[in-house]
Image: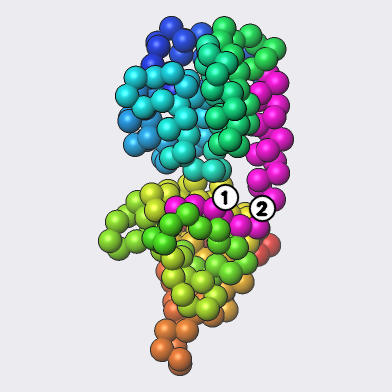
Amino acid sequence: MIKCVILDDELLAISYLKLLCEQIDNVEVVKAYNDPKVFLNDIGNQDCNVCILDIEMPGMNGLQVAELISPSKKIIFTTAYKEYAAEAFDLNVVDYVRKPIKKERLIQAFEKAQELISLSQKKDFIEWNTNIGRSIIFTEQIAYIKTSEIDSRDKEIILNDYSTMVLKNLSFKNLLEILPSKDFAQINKKEIIALSSIKAFSTNEIITTISIDGENFLKLQIGEAYKSTLMEMFGK
């Protein structure tokens, strides 16, 4: 299922794009924006996998916006101008669709996006902005993830060697879309555990393999809303 958001400074263009999308199977428009700054402030919390961005916009163009979006969200550019094509593809976007947009051409772009989404779900690493810059983190090295105590928009990762990294401005919802679902579980509102880091668990508590002081191990509380999902992962 393609869940897309639209960014275009022209309201008529947004209405037309939404109309086209509604005519295409397995495509849902989650939200539409006409202001790049509002879009960037909100996009991390939207449940979407495709962003349709107009390139020509006042203040901040679509190319600049694309550089600030999570790589987990696939980008389709729309524009009336062909001179941006080379620069657009330098950003490794899904497609570049010329205006006026035709339904058949938009379907082609969505088909490309769906293929890439399917491939990205098989990735074994996260690529994201961190406290040390743009980083690639292999998911098999992640032991535990928690909400940062400094800024709740950030997520602190504890790796298997006990080193830490901070993922900047990433919601748990979007993080779980990136992580392999078979290997990680959210256990409460503020914590995600790698299943490989679980030593034992009861209905309320997890004992991890993460050492606190060389003798004791980190214990985590299981939130009521997350118990059934966790039990299902272990076939209970």
Q: Please give the label number shown on residue 123.
A: 2
Compared to 33, does 113 lie above or below? Answer: below
Q: Secondary structure at mark 1?
A: helix
Of the image marks 1 and 2, the number of the one nearer the N terminus:
2
Residue 193 numbered mark, or none: none
Q: Main secondary structure of the magenta part?
A: helix
Which range is magenta? 107-129
- Which type of secondary structure does the marked residue at label 2 adopt? loop
State the image coordinates of residue 158 (x, y, percent, origin top left): 47, 70
In the image, 200 versus 4, the foreground residue is: 4
Q: From what the image shows, is residue 159 above or below residue 101?
A: below
Give the residue displayed 60% in from the left and 18% down from the top: 97
Q: Quadrant of residue 126?
A: bottom right
87 magenta-colored? no
Task: Look at label 1 and name its amino acid.
Answer: Ile
Residue 178's disc number: 1
Which residue is located at x 44 percent, y 65 percent? Answer: 165
The x, y position of residue 175, in whole percent, is 50, 51
| Residue 9 versus residue 3 in the image, above or below | above
User: What residue is drawn where x is 56% and y is 36%?
Assistant: 91
Q: For residue 117: magenta?
A: yes
The answer to whether residue 13 shows anywhere in this view is: yes
**Camera-side residue of 86 and 52:** 86
Q: Amino acid at mark 2?
A: Lys
**Which image quarter is the C terminus in?**
bottom right
Image spot of residue 188 (x, y percent)? 43, 59
Give me the residue at 29% from left, 56% from top: 151
Q: Is residue 203 left or right of residue 26?
A: left
**234 w.r.t. 118: above or below:** below
Q: Does residue 230 show up?
A: no
Report the quarter where the N terminus lies.
Answer: top right
* Mark 1 touches mark 2? (CB < 8 Å): yes
